[in-house]
């Protein structure tokens, strides 16, 4: 294009020069050859003035040269405008392509950000679900498998495991998992040494999350035969009240399945899991404490009943032929069997259907409800047995309450007697009077045949 433009300019200048030289040459020949005059400037001008047509003819190449010059100039301007227009079109196309590329990049970023926000929203929703589960499930054996299954289903991780540190703090024990391989690992007692084995061991020792985008290149990854498809892994610590409970282990079949943003999102979920585990542990401790107190209370109750039964033998009543009397004689085999088994016994004794239901207090049989029908009557059915069992439960509560009341009354009487004796002893400051009062009060209180108080340090 530049070369063409330069050629146009050259030809235009050449035409202009030729158009200027041609009339000069023709006038010069006319003066010298036709007029036979010297070729002076005056003679050449006079020749042009005397013959106007010759002047017009001779100057026409010059005019044509000027026209060619103008044409070349405008052609050159048109060429430049075309070039500028083409450059502007190319620049517009480049800008359009750049805008399209930027729009595509922006759309990709928006899509990635939207996906990340949706993923984070899923983590937050999952954390809320775990938080709700923590308020309704109080045992680790039930809570942890549900958490693993929930996280796996919600986020598509093929293996989710929860490790808890043992009592020594030297091992992280796998307590729950959703995958079949993880369940086999639990069955064989899978554990990792803290700080020595696996990403989980690293996390439990340092208390910080770790990601292995390619487990084949991470030296900390612990390979197990039960999970051969693992390509990437992430583990997060489980804290509660500043105490490290264990780790949440997540594994994927895809390499590079986790990003640093996932740590922030999963940490919210891990915190909820930690809270749920801590609540379950506290509940178990509370249950153990209550069970210990229940056993202690039951033992105290049983000992009190043994004392009561030792003091009041043959305690019981019998209703027969519309009369109430004291129960005498040995217990029947059905009664003994019901008391020993701690459950109702139904059988036929001497052709009479019999039902024996133990009266249980704190899990120990303190008596038996024994009922018999007349010969030939139908056996005791389930409805009748359930009714008698309900009455036995109510009877056990009533007699235990009566025992507690009697024991409370007895203790109150003892405390009152002790207070009265102490009051009588404090009425005098004389040692002999105090000793005489003490001997008298003790003898009268216990109806003792003899009461002796000796104070003689030399004999001690």
Image: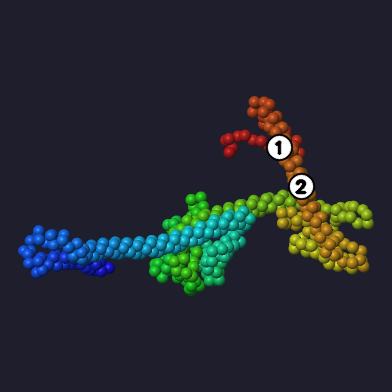
On screen, residue 302 above or below 437: below
Pinpoint residue 327: horizontal percent, then vertical percent.
85, 55
On screen, residue 436 above or below 391: above
> Looking at the image, which is closer to me, 28 or 78?
28
**Mark 1 vs mark 2: which is more N-terminal?**
2
Residue 258 left/right relative to 68:
right
Pointer 2 residue? 401
Pinpoint residue 54: horizontal percent, then vertical percent.
18, 65
Element under label 2?
helix
Query: Farthest left residue?
Result: 38
Q: Which quarter of the figure has residue 212? A: bottom left
Nearer to us of marks 1 and 2 is 2
The answer, for residue 281, to whether it is visible in the render is: no
Pinpoint residue 132: horizontal percent, then vertical percent.
61, 55
> Looking at the image, which is closer to me, 336 or 222?
222
The answer, for residue 15, to whether it is visible in the render is: yes
Task: Tell me the residue at 58%/55% (across/down).
Answer: 128
Colour mapping: rainbow
Report crowding for label 2: few under 14, some 14 to 19, many 20 or more residues within 10 A (C-alpha).
Answer: few
Task: Tell me the residue at 84%/62% (across/down).
Answer: 383
Pinpoint residue 108: horizontal percent, then vertical percent.
46, 62
> Looking at the image, which is closer to me, 183 or 449?
183
Quarter of the image with the N terminus is bottom left
Quarter of the image with the C terminus is top right
Pointer 1 residue? 415
Between marks 1 and 2, how big is the CA–CA gap? 21 Å
Residue 384 left/right relative to 427:
right
Residue 205 left/right relative to 310:
left
Report crowding for label 1: few under 14, some 14 to 19, many 20 or more residues within 10 A (C-alpha).
Answer: few
Element under label 1?
helix
Task: Tell me the residue at 52%/60% (across/down).
Answer: 119
């Amino acid at each position: 294009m530049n070369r063409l433009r330069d050629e146009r300019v050259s030809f235009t200048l050449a035409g202009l020069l030729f158009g200027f030289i041609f009339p000069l040459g023709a006038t010069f020949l006319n003066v010298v050859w036709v007029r036979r005059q010297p070729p002076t400037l005056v003679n050449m001008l006079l020749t042009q003035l005397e013959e106007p047509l010759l002047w017009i003819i001779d100057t026409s190449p010059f005019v044509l040269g000027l026209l060619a010059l103008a044409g070349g100039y405008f052609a050159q301007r048109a060429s430049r405008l075309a070039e500028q227009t083409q450059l502007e079109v190319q620049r517009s196309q480049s800008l359009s392509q750049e805008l399209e590329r930027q729009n595509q990049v922006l759309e990709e970023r928006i899509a990635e950000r939207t996906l990340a926000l949706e993923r984070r929203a899923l983590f937050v929703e999952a954390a809320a679900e775990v938080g709700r589960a923590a308020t309704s499930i109080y045992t680790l054996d039930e809570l942890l498998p549900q958490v693993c299954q929930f996280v796996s289903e919600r986020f598509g991780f093929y293996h989710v495991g929860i490790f808890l540190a043992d009592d020594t703090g030297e091992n992280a024990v796998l307590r729950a998992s959703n995958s079949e391989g993880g369940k086999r690992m639990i069955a064989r007692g899978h554990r990792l040494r803290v700080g020595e084995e696996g990403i989980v061991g690293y996390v439990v020792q340092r208390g910080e999350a770790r990601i292995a985008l390619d487990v084949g290149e991470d030296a900390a990854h612990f390979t197990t035969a039960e999970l051969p498809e693992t390509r990437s892994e992430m583990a997060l610590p489980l804290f509660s009240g500043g105490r490290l409970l264990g780790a949440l282990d997540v594994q994927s079949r895809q390499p590079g399945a986790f990003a640093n943003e996932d740590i922030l999102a999963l940490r919210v979920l891990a915190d909820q899991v930690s809270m749920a585990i801590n609540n379950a542990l506290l509940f178990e401790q509370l249950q153990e404490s209550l069970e210990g107190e229940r056993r202690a209370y039951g033992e105290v109750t049983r000992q009190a009943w043994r004392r009561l039964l030792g003091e009041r033998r043959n305690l019981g009543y019998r209703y027969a032929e519309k009369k109430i009397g004291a129960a005498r004689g040995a217990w029947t085999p059905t009664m003994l069997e019901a008391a020993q088994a701690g459950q109702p016994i139904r059988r036929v004794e001497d052709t009479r259907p019999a039902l024996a239901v133990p009266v249980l207090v704190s899990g120990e049989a303190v008596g038996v409800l024994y009922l018999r029908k007349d010969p030939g009557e139908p056996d005791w059915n389930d409805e009748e047995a359930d009714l008698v069992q309900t009455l036995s439960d109510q009877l056990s509560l009533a007699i235990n309450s009566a025992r507690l009341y009697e024991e409370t009354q007895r203790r109150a009487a003892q405390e009152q007697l002790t207070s009265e004796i102490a009051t009588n002893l404090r009425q005098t400051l004389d040692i002999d009077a105090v000793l005489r009062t003490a001997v008298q009060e003790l003898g009268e209180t216990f109806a003792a045949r003899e009461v002796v108080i000796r104070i003689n340090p030399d004999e001690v």
